[in-house]
Amino acid sequence: MRYDLTDLKLFINIGEVSNLTRAAERTFLSLPAASARIKNLEDSLKVRLLIRQVTGVSVTPAGEVFLKYAKEVFAQLECMHAELQPFSTGIKGRLRIMANTAATHSFMSEALSTFLAENPDIDIELEEKLSKDIVSAIRGGSVDIGIVSSNVNLDGLDAIPLFRDQLVAVTHLSHPLKDLNEISFENLIDRYQFIGINPESAIQAFLDDKAYKLGKRLHQRVHVGSFEAVCRMVDAGIGLAIVPIECARAYSRAPRLHILKLTDEWADRERNVCRLAGRDLPAYAEKFIGHLLEVSQRMHER
């Protein structure tokens, strides 16, 4: 049997609005033409797809199956269009990625620089978000790949463990906390002044939320634009900060900062690279996921 894309689009619209008249309008068909198309589909398939009611229409179990595959057909067409469209501008592909602050400022910088150098015909859009917002964006189809922490609901996503990300407190070497090896976030909030990264960043929103849930508020002396700048401020004795351990180690190779482990469970998080379950991605997106895993492995072996 041959299927008409207009029939499939009409049925998708019916599934969304549960009204044949509105679905016909959305598909740019007259009501009689839409009714005839549905009848022809049902006659050809020899199954009932819709239940007509006074208040509208509902989809039968057979109709649910038809609707599922109709949506998949259009998802595949969109994927094809996404892969073909960039050829007209000389770019082979465009990849949409979201990651949290820690990944954006550390792991992703190395992964992106090497991948883009090796693939000059691929463009990448990288946006920084909280893990919960990244998951929502993946489910909504507005992003191809996300790097998220394991403490969010990953239902409906394919997730591959990527690396562990530990948040630590850093202080000046002469700070009153210099003799401690670990401390809880709660014991820091009331007593000390903080250096923060951009207040719009995902990690700053994350820490502000943790403080709020404790009924407290971080005393931020200053916000700066990068983790390196944060560490420089701490090194100058302006205050202390919460940063990813890799950033603290990179700055404090001398050593120049005192690093304290945070005893809070949320400070030690596994990062996953995620995609929508069952969704086919362009070949260059699959290649990028493989590249992320290779970079993660190299960093782990250092």
Image: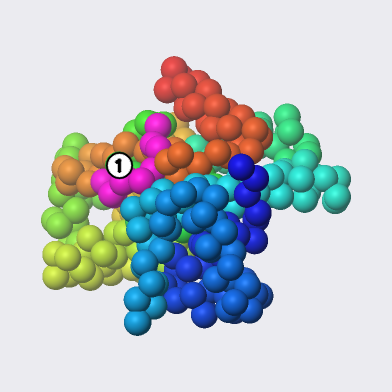
Q: As drawn, which residue projects farthest toward the top? A: 301
Left or right relative to 121: residue 221 = left
Q: Where's the N terminus, which quadrant?
A: top right
Left or right relative to 192: residue 204 = right
Which is more toward the observer, 13 or 302?
A: 13
Question: Residue at the location (78% across, 37% down)?
Answer: 120
Kindly indicate the quadrant of the structure image that contains residue 265: top left
Question: Residue at the location (35% across, 58% down)?
Answer: 60
Q: Is residue 75 magenta?
A: no
Question: Residue at the location (32% across, 36% down)?
Answer: 270
Left or right relative to 156: residue 12 = right
Q: Which residues are magenta?
A: 151-160
Vertical side of 291 occupied by 275: above or below: below
Measuring from the top left, give residue 195's x and y in whole percent: 37, 60
Kindly indicate the quadrant of the structure image that contains residue 222: bottom left
Q: Residues within 10 Å of mark 1 (few under 14, many from 20)?
A: some
Q: How is the image coloured?
A: rainbow
Which is more toward the observer, 194 or 67?
A: 67
Secondary-structure class at tag 1:
loop
Measuring from the top left, give residue 103's x and y in whole percent: 46, 44
What type of secondary structure mainly makes up the magenta span? loop
User: Is residue 228 something that shows in the picture?
Assistant: no
Q: Is residue 159 magenta?
A: yes
Left or right relative to 95: residue 47 = left
Q: Amino acid at mark 1?
A: Ser
Kindly indicate the quadrant of the structure image that contains residue 157: top left
Measuring from the top left, give residue 207's x and y in whole percent: 29, 59
Q: How many marks?
A: 1
Question: Residue at the location (37% across, 31% down)?
Answer: 161
Measuring from the top left, give residue 132's x and y in whole percent: 35, 56
Vertical side of 15 occupied by 164: above or below: above
